[in-house]
Amino acid sequence: MMTPIDRLKRNLEASIQAKQALMQNSATLAVFAEAVDATVACYQRGHRIYIAGNGGSAADAQHLAAEFVSKLARDRAPLAAEALTTDSSILTAIGNDYGFDQVFARQLAGKAVAGDMFLGISTSGQSPNILKALERCREMRVPSILFAGRDGGPATQLADFSIVVPGQATSTIQELHIVLAHTLCECVEVAIFGE
C-alpha cells in the first residue's frame, strides 16, 4: 500500500516531468508568447479580458481575474478582467432558459465588445460551454485563448491561441494552468507598467 509520502513524491514527480516537458515544447511556448502579446494589446487599447472554466478551472478563472484587477506582485492600476463563473443568478437563468452549454457564450454576447479577449480553461478541451463560448468569440471577432491539456480536444480548432499542456492527470494539468495564468499576468504587468 502506498504511503502518503509515496503519493506526494509520485505527484511531485509527475508535476516536475510535466513542467519540464512544457519548457521543452518550443511550439507551445511560442503560442503562449503570442497570447501574451495579444493580451497586452487588448489592455493597451483600453479593453478587458473575460475568463471561464468549470469546476477547478472555474476557480482558476476567478483566481486570474483577481490577479488582473487587484495585483499579482506589486501595486499598480487595476486591469479590467471578469470571471464569467461567479454570478449565480446569471448562470442559473441562462442554464435554465438556454442550457448549461450557453452559460458563457450568452454572457459574452451581452458583455464583450470587439477588442476584448476571452480565456477559456478546460483540462480536456471538450467542455461544451467552453466550445460554445469560443464559437461566440469567433462570431463576435473577440480574440480567444485556450488553456487545455491532454490532446486539447476540439477547442483547439476554435481558439486563436491554443496552449495545450502535457500531463494526463487533471490535477497536473491544472497546476500547469496556474503557472501559465500567473506568467500571463506577470508579463502583462511588466509590459504595461514596467519592471
Image (spheres, helix red, strand yellow):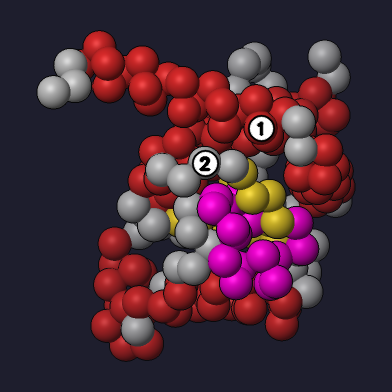
- What residue is shown with label 1? 21
Give the vertical position of 163 relative to 160 (above or below): above
On screen, residue 125 versus residue 101, left or right, reads right
- Please tell me which residue lies in front, 82 or 104: 104
Q: Where is residue 15 drawn, in percent x and y? A: 49, 27
Question: In which quadrant of the rendered view does residue 170 lie?
Answer: top left
- Please tell me which residue lies in front, 188 or 36: 36
Q: In which quadrant is the C terminus drawn? A: top right
Q: Are marks 1 and 2 in contact (CB under 8 Å)?
A: yes
Q: Which mark is residue 167?
A: 2
Q: Residues within 10 Å of mark 2 (few under 14, many from 20)?
A: many
Q: Where is residue 7 drawn, in percent x and y? A: 27, 22
The answer to whether any part of residue 165 appears in the image is: yes
Secondary structure of the residue carrying tag 2 is: loop
- Please tell me which residue lies in front, 136 or 131: 131
25 drawn magenta: no
Give the vertical position of 157 relative to 164 (above or below): below
Q: Where is residue 32 drawn, in percent x and y? A: 77, 43
Q: Residue furthest bottom?
A: 97
State the extent of the magenta-drawn residues as a range: 146-161
